[in-house]
Image (cartoon, grey):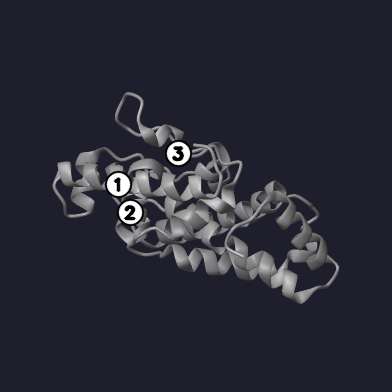
Amino acid sequence: MSRSSNQDVSELIRKARAGDPACRDALFALCRSYLGVVAGAQIETWLRAKVDASDVVQQTMLEAHRDFARFDGQSEKEWLGWLRGILKHNLADFVRCYRGTAKRQARREVRWRDPAASTFAHGVPEPAAPGATPSQEVVRMDNELRVAAALAELPEDYREVIALRNFQRLPFAEVAERMNRSRPAAQMLWMRALAKLEEALEGEGIEI
């Protein structure tokens, strides 16, 4: 089940809590793409060389499986908030670990964002460049799992440019450098990526 409604998730939670293993597996599978997008958006540049988002997601999924009995919510919002809390804890552990084992110059210190206040809690952050852009209206996150699933289905370069521009809020000059492209090419790629995401979301009946 790659697409979900609040009712779908609530029903899966109810059945999983009642001991249905298939529903429990479906509930977790439904959220893997979501956690991947959130983790990818939260891992800062200096940590990316040391930690892969998939490692953080895997650790989060393992702990969520282990502690599922402690989750006492019923809605999709509560479920995703609980998962983000575990993800936040794991990210903090990685940050403490690597800050404790390697010295970095003060100018390279970057404050990492709390996943609980991520794109998937409050909508896509406004890009670094001023002025209204399509990215400001991409999503308002009433359908967090659907948006995550749509992002996961985009080509890798589309996902990357959206993550760099919208989630990390980097200027186009830096986006272009990271992706080894010219600035005009990076801007064009970003516009195509947003158009593709909008198309996918509209196909799911999500207003943007």
> Which residue reaches farthest top?
131
Location of mark 3 (residue): 138
Give left or right: position of 49 versus 179: right
Q: Position of residue 128 (x, y in %)?
A: 32, 32
Q: How far across and how far down the image is residue 172, in percent?
A: 23, 40
Q: Which mark is residue 158?
A: 2
Identify residue for label 1: 192
Q: CA distance from mark 2 to mark 1?
A: 8 Å
Q: Where is residue 30, by image quadrant?
A: bottom right
- What secondary structure is marked by label 1? helix
* Amino acid type assigned to the residue bearing label 2 in the image: Tyr
Is 6 above or below relative to 1?
A: above
Q: Could you tell whether 38 is left or right of 155 in the image? A: right
Amino acid under disc 3: Val
Count of labels in the image? 3
Q: Earlier in the sequence, mark 2 or mark 1?
A: 2
In the rendered image, residue 20, in percent from the top left (x then y), is placed at 80, 73
- Neighbour class for label 2 at 10 Å: few (<14), some, many (≥20)? many
